[in-house]
Image (cartoon, helix red, strand yellow):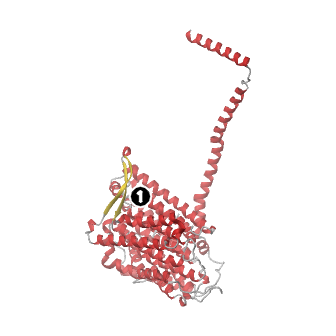
Amino acid sequence: MIAAVIALPALSAALLLSLGNRTNKFGPWMAIIASTSSFLIGFLQFLQMLARPAEERTAITTVYEWLAVPAAGFKVDFALQLDQLSISFVLLITFVGTLIHIYSLGYMSHDENQRRFFAYLNLFVAAMLLLVLADNYLLLYVGWEGVGLASYLLIGFWQHKPSAAVAAKKAFVANRVGDFGLSLAIMTMFIVFGSVSFSDVNEGVAGAPAWVSLTIGLLLLLAACGKSAQFPLQSWLLDAMEGPTPVSALIHAATMVTAGVYLIVRSASIFNASEIAQTAVVVIGAISLLMGAIIGAAKDDIKKSLAGSTMSQIGYMVLAAGLGPIGYVFAILHLITHGFFKAVMFLGAGSVMHATNDNVDMRRYGGLSKVMIFTTITFFIGYLAIIGIPPFAGFYSKDHIIEAALSHSWWAGAAVLFGAGLTAFYMTRMVVMTFVSKPRWEDDVHPHESPLSMTLPMIVLSIGAASMGIILTNNHMFEHWLEPVTGFVEPEPPLPIQTITIITLSVVAIGVLAGIWQYRKIAKVAPKKVSFVVTAARKDLYGDVMNEALLMRPGQSLTKVLNIFDKSVIDGFVNGLGLFTGGISSRLRKSETGYVRSYAMSIVFGTAILVIVLLIVRL
């Protein structure tokens, strides 16, 4: 039945796209039913897994023989692997995805292309499910590319806006860089191990030379950076906010941006075999979590501030995944809690935009808590979860990452602690500017609460943001759940856990107070005289400039050189050959006079030459 989890949203997307306007009336509901059905089937599989012993919870289903090259001894089946890790993602993707589908009923109700939007949502869910259920890296790559295609379609959904079209292309191109790393990793696996299945690679990497695990690990990290918007391939994420807000909640909170974290954790055996590759993952995660937090603290656009926050929180997960067996479980734990509290905040931002004529400038908000009760409460729960206030979900997942980071090294621990303070600062800034401060609305804005189709998913997600941490960490339940797949080693931090918790909450409190103090007065226009750090953060820490210098300019120079080579050498040879042939033919053409006597003379001379040649040969 697990194949149906993928097939239902895929079939729904195919019908909605192929039947066109004839499905306008029932299309959105078809998409919701398909996503809901996938969740119910996944939940049924989860219950059946719980009834089995831990060592019998992995099941591989071969749908059909996909690729076979007998001469090369290469065979890849379209096979799905259901285990503790994949089912965790299935439940997250389908549950949060279904709620976002329902939210979109209200948010996209006035869009004339609503049916097409829901088709793209279903396509995205199907591709993401294929990615996490694949039994081998090649099939995972199909889902990986499907997610990239769906994100391109969703980010550029309002393609009549030049900014949306450019953002979609930017996301597509940036992801191609990471995808190139994944394709090279898969090729390397085939060359070294002769297989691309997870089981064969896991067995082969144990006895392989050190360069193999290092090379594959770094290539997989490159792939993860592209899909999860980590340094240095992060610049597409903030521009991707041009898409409809439900897209931001689905892609940039609970699903697509977490694909890189899944890839690293699924490839645990590869990274465990290379300490250098693990260290690279930790470094990239640390840089990204700090960069994202700094960017989020400088943006007045509520969605772009949340996008910077997403980059930062994914950085926490990547850093934890780089810690090896002490961090894999906590990376996935934070991934799940983040799926709830970040989704509810993105949907809350969409609710605020819906109430303020699609305005995204937080400097034009203020006082919304008085007119948007449900949005304020649910957003505030997400806020408490992300900054790590007990007993909300983020406290449990982030606290474990801090403990694991301190067990690894002092600099990794310092990075996550500083990131926790920055998170508290920029999220407090967002809450104060949007809900608590004095109203700064335009005269034509009349804020109001969103309809039930939008507030109900937010309420459900906020309940998860408040409770998932307690549920999953009760009696170390989640650690025991994932241990058979990822392995687990208890962290040994240099300080008692209670002390680390006190230090972390103190840092968070400082960030909250700094945010309240800094934004006790808010101007309607952002100040121009600011520090270099704020200027750089407003420009995304010059991520676009860096990509232009490292990727675009060298590419343009290479293109110019190849253009000169093409014109001078390739075209020169082809054109020269044509001129040579044309010159000979023009001269031969002169011999065609049309006179019989000329042709007779040619025959006589030709015969004479032939006779002379034959005589010479005989002699």
Q: Is residue 329 left or right of residue 55?
A: right
Describe the element under mark 1 as helix, strand or loop: helix
In the image, 338 versus 289, the foreground residue is: 338
Amino acid bearing label 1: Leu
Q: In this view, does 118 lie to the left or right of 76?
A: right
Q: What residue is rendered at 64% in x and 48% in y?
A: 563
Q: Where is residue 398, by image quadrant?
A: bottom left
Query: Measured along the vertical axis of the image, is residue 296 above or below residue 17?
Result: below
In the image, 280 versus 584, the foreground residue is: 584
Residue 170 in view here: yes
In the rendered image, residue 438, in percent from the top left (x then y), is placed at: 59, 89
Q: In this view, does 25 lie to the left or right of 192?
A: right
Query: Measured along the vertical axis of the image, is residue 240 above or below residue 300?
Result: above
Q: In this view, does 543 lie to the left or right of 282?
A: right
In the rendered image, residue 553, in percent from the top left (x then y), is placed at: 62, 57
Residue 346 in view here: no
In the rendered image, residue 498, in percent from the top left (x then y), is placed at: 36, 81
- Extreme bottom residue here? 370
In the picture, which quadrant includes the C terminus?
top right
Are there few (<14), some (14-19), or many (20+) residues within 10 Å of tag 1? Answer: many
Query: Measured along the vertical axis of the image, is residue 79 above or below residue 420?
Result: above
In the image, 264 versus 210, the foreground residue is: 264
**Residue matched to label 1:** 139
